[in-house]
Amino acid sequence: MMQPDQVVTELPVTGWTGPFGPQIVQTAVSALEAGRVIVLPALAFAAEPAELSVLSADLLSGRRKNISLDRATGKIGGAAAVPAPLEALMRRFAFQADSLARGLLAPYGAALRAGRTSFRPAEIAGRSYSPRKDDRRLHIDAFPTRPLHGDRILRLFANIAPDGKARAWRVGEPFASLAARFLPSLPTPTAARARLYAMLGLTKGVRSGYDQLMLALHDTMKLDEAYQSRAPALPWSFPAGTTWMVFTDQVPHAAMAGHFALEQTFYLPVSAMASPETAPLRVLERLTGRVLA
Ligand SMILES: [Fe+2]
């Protein structure tokens, strides 16, 4: 059984803007890199009444799980129509998430790059998904179309559920034990297939050996029924009005229930980490004895 202090570190942050003291910054960086979820129980993202009034899972188009904001182009995807208050809410969240991450994780400096912003209005419990897309199964994040070559995926979440419903997760075992468990059953990366996928336009650039292993790990662990029912994991609930951050490429997680979460993705090169040896890239390289990116 996992213990709470292996899984989460709570920090008494009360504002989205730094500067933050050196001690809290150091605690934040070392907890994240050690594979813990940083929980900020006293930090709520405030939605305005006009914004709250338009929040609805009905905004999603088709079977989409998220409404996403591409900060580079300013385009919003995943919604049939985007009411102005929702757009305002997502842009303000993107700005505040950026400010918080840059302050609390100041040592990463400009190496920390902001990716997409997403709004996840739909209730997770009771929906049906294909097993590979079912994020209620323990998984690590790996992106099928965007090769990362070892870059880290850091995600910041805020629960803004107007009805006060908590977001319920399960948080799994350390990455090194996960990787050691599954590596023998993962296919060996092949450069030929990676080049073919890039040529066919299925990926934005060529997948490294790292990307191939991480995608295989994501799928294999999700589809392993015995692992899903018996894996070491700790249930953790994030109350409405709280914020949390985690390296989702490293920490096995499953989102079991909840609705109305906001999420901001960041990318970080391994070279910018305080303890690069904890990166999934370095762990997989140690275990395989190969250079993977
Ligand atoms: Fe995930």
Image: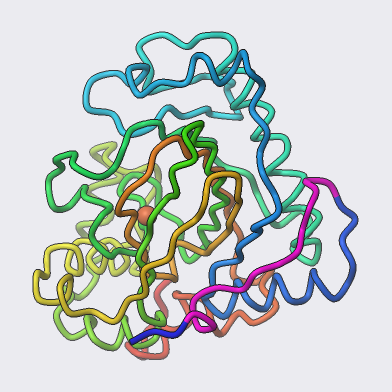
Task: State the residue at coordinates (36%, 80%).
Answer: 173
Instruction: Give the x, y percent position of residue 180.
Output: 29, 88
Q: Is residue 93 above or below residue 53?
A: below
Extreme residue toward the left, this view: 225
Q: Is residue 146 left or right of residue 242?
A: left
Instruction: Give the x, y percent position of residue 64.
Output: 28, 29
Q: Is residue 28 above or below residue 128?
A: below
Q: Is residue 100 above or below residue 189?
A: above
Task: State the residue at coordinates (59%, 18%).
Answer: 51
* Residue 73 placement: quadrant: top right
Q: Specify the quarter for ligand 1.
A: bottom left
Instruction: Give the x, y percent position of residue 207.
Output: 34, 57
Q: Quadrant of the C terminus?
A: bottom left
State the residue in front, 219 or 285.
Answer: 219
Instruction: Give the x, y percent position of residue 241.
Output: 60, 44
* Residue 246 placement: quadrant: bottom right
Task: State the residue at coordinates (40%, 21%).
Answer: 56
* Count of numbered badges drawn on the protein: 0
* Residue 264 placement: quadrant: top right
Quick check: is 189 in the magenta stretch? no
Task: State the residue at coordinates (20%, 57%).
Answer: 193
Q: Is residue 13 left or right of residue 10?
A: right
Query: Which portion, as a residue range, is magenta?
Result: 4-17
Q: Is residue 190 left or right of residue 278?
A: left
Q: Is residue 174 left or right of residue 27?
A: left
State the residue in front, 85 or 62.
Answer: 85
Q: Quadrant of the N terminus?
A: bottom left
